[in-house]
Image (cartoon, coloured by chain):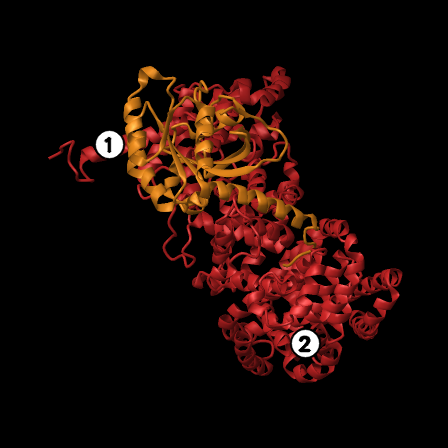
Chain colours: A orange, B red
Amino acid sequence: MGSSSGQSGGSYDLSFKILLIGDSGVGKSCLLLSFISSSVEDLAPTIGVDFKIKLLTVGGKRLKLTIWDTAGQERFRTLTNSYYRGAQGIILVYDVTRRETFTNLCDVWAKEVELYSTNKDCVKMLVGNKVDRESERVVSREEGMALAKELGCLFVECSAKTRENVEQCFEELALKIMEVPSLLEEGSNLKRNILKQKTENQAPPRGGCCS
Amino acid sequence: MDNPLSQDPDSTWSRFFRNAELEKMVDQDLSRLYPEHGSYFQTPGCQGMLRRILLLWCLRHPEYGYRQGMHELLAPLLYVLHVDIERLYEVRKLYDDQFTDKFDGLSFQENDNTYSFDFKKFLDSIEDDLGSQGNSKKVRSLNELEPEIQNIILLTDAYGAEGELGIVLSEKFMEHDAYCMLDALMSGAHGSVAMVDFFTPSPPAGSCSGLPPVIEASAAFYHLLFVVDSSLHCHLIELGVEPQYFALRWLRVLFGREFSLQDLLIIWDEIFVADNTKLVNSAEDDLGSSFKILSSPRGALISAMAVSMILYIRSSLLATENATSCLQRLLNFPENINLRKIIEKAKSLQVLALDVNVSSSSFPFNGAYNHSKSVVPRSLNLPLDPVSPKTPLSVVPDSYWEEKWRVVHKAEEQKQGSLEKQNSSRRKGWSEKVRLRLSRTESDPSSSRVENGKGDHRLSMRRSLLEDLSRQLGLDEQGEKVGSHEVSSQKDQNSVEAQVEGHDGVSEEFTCTAEERCPSGNVVSDENSSTFSDPTSAASGTNDQENDSEKSSVASNLFIDENDDHSYNNVEDSPLPVSIPPDGVCPNSPDKNDSTGKAEAGLKDRKLLPGKFQWFWKFGRSSVNYETSEKGGGTHEVAESADGEINKRNEIDSSTADVSLSSSSSSKGEVVDQNVMGTLKNLGQSMLEHIQVLESTFQQDRGQGSLENFSKNVLVGKGQVTALTALKELRKISNLLSEM
């Protein structure tokens, strides 16, 4: 399964929406930044939502991943509903050096996914971040795998800082999504519709408009 | 008793654990505060202060607790205090002798050196400044100093001008001051904008919108955007870009993430200078039907700021084709910006924002509510799906927004034939033709949508006016004309009822006109389809700022009704040899005579009010003379309601501008007072302008038409002639008016 990421043009075959959730400070934004731009830096806490778009090629298909990143505190839901809507993949992130972020995943976040995710087939993935700080680790790999099994998720441990497993994490998720026929269809639907929209939009934007 | 394992939430231990949790949360965010400004905000002294202030505030407000973003509201406040004190410190070093307390010989030098901050980096400019004055250290008297430095010295004089206030600038009080400032900012200090609202996920008690305040506020500025630049608003709505996605961040940290700290301070200055007291706008507020954020000048400025920011990246946003790319631009506000421009725009919009709230206070709140809600069914598919505007609008609950779309879609549907189920029985034949036409001419349906939008905007106003109507009229109009008022309000009731029933009729009506114009439009555009694209956008581009406010005044004024809408659209679609105006106008001209007589009596005095209203409105908008419009506050509201009435009438009578215009002119002779004269003059002028626009369109039409295809044009010709004669009449009238 040769896979390489590339920024080539704006064309792609499939498009997926992926969410990052988990407690504040587990490194969701860093994970995303590390994946998108290969850079590692300190980030201010996310407020509300942010998202990034990444084009990459996985399994011979050109993919466009729209990855949404929420503030860990957004479980105080101002946005929750609309945020979960139509996601094909959800990444649940915890910090291997902070046990409460791990327990919150099954106590809080998994329930929230259950509650808000509109997509039954949606692929979930459990990600233990900050494995570079091996000495501070409090959540073992085995525990992570057990929880992943319990929640029916994929599992990977990674480090946004060293970029270890970061790309694999997103690629594996994308591959899994492509294995699910309904999700695959959603992803390619979007493509078609965007094209359709484009042709529509070639007509001028409405002038003057209402008011 | 105090068992660490106790489940009692009030036990000392559980409080201890809760506080530990809070501390951890605060620390975690503080350690990530402005990582790029590292040296200052990450110093232990600064972190300590921020931490103490935040923890104290959170403990004193357990109902809110700590929410991410609060620390970024505090940090700039502390920073400003710091800069001031550092400045004082520098000045004191230079003019040491001036600071000596002559009264009791106590030197005022004991500095509280608890904090050691690294200011140096942030004060380069100030230091340079002082460096140049370095040699003039010995000054004999205070009066020889620069006023600014005098102020600094006086402010710190324990027994100085401030008397018992004593020291204003002091490191000793900095933390205290920062706390108080944060508290005031959070609670709004009894004003209307309380930042803490933006952090609460639940609607405040007494909110009728049932929305979290931050969502309500984003709906408010989307509404403002709609008034200011409806085409951009349409674009965002069509893409399914919900305002809260970006507004949440904009509002929670008060734009802190969108601008550099230096720019932010300037913006905050503007915002905090604006008065935060809630404007009393009559009974509407009790009904809670207006946007809370817009009810104070400060809140209005905040919304205006947001709109100004959106407008700043307008072209970039209009170029986007899907929600994600659009949001991406909104969430990554450009760095090299012309801050002055944004602020000035915001300030000019502030006036409008307050105005909007006045008018939208009679606007059913569902409108705004569903505004955000109505996006939901579409954004369900947000980045993934066809965000087509034709998706299931019927799902949305009954509301302003739905109405708007429903009408739009009815018109569109029929043209596009995309949802033929509902009207499959009717006019299949032409809908096919139309589809053909539409596939090439996007601008046309959108212009019709535009009209619908206007119509509907009014429609909802009207609907809500229903409730306020008699009350408002009763209260406000008394002084003016009591007799006629009774008549009119009675008529209102009738017309309002008719309006509500006939609500569907309105769209029906519209579809009729659409139908009427189709054959000819179809024919012509077939030849012309290629010419649409560019000029429209160009026109809308140039028009947007001024014309939009103009247009919105037109819309809410209805005075210059459908015809003018046509004219506007025509201007924008100018290359299209539009046969719409003739079609739109000519059916009216017969109407004119009938309904003029009919409507005259009832409309007579009411017509004046909208006139006045328009006048005020215009001036208020251009903020040339806002006082006038305020002064006219009373009339303003009356006018507004009267406005609504007439609208109703017009819809019901299915008469258009001609009616109101001619009847207004007929009323002119009867009620004469100075104010009215001025108003009429103004009105005449604006009518003239509009007529000119119409005429020029016609001229263009003709020219192009004959070039394109003469025989087709003949079909249209008849209507044109009638329309032109009608126009001439109008011209005469407006000449009369402006000569008065």
**Amino acid under label 1?**
Phe
Chain letter of the residue beneath label 1 in the structure image: B
- Residue B192 to residue B55: above or below: below
Q: Which residue is mark 2?
A: B655
Residue B195: % across, % down:
44, 43
- Residue B222 to residue A128: above or below: below
- Give the CA separation, mark 1 to mark 2: 71 Å
SS of the residue at dot 1? helix
Instruction: Work out whether mark 1 precedes mark 2 in sequence or the reverse, and give the earlier one.
Output: 1
Structural crowding at the residue carrying mark 1, measured as other residues with C-alpha within 10 Å and reported as few (<14), some (14–19) or many (≥20): few
Residue B79: % across, % down:
48, 29
Using the rendered image of the protein, determine whether residue B597 is visible from the camera's viewpoint: yes
**The label number, if any, that marks residue B17 in the structure image:** 1
- Residue B259 to residue B548: above or below: above
The quarter of the rendered structure image containing the C terminus of chain A is bottom right
**Amino acid under label 2?**
Ser
SS of the residue at dot 2? loop
Frontmost of labels 1 and 2 is 2
Determine the residue located farthest toward the left in the rendered image: B1
Q: Residue at x 41, y 21 (%)?
A: A159
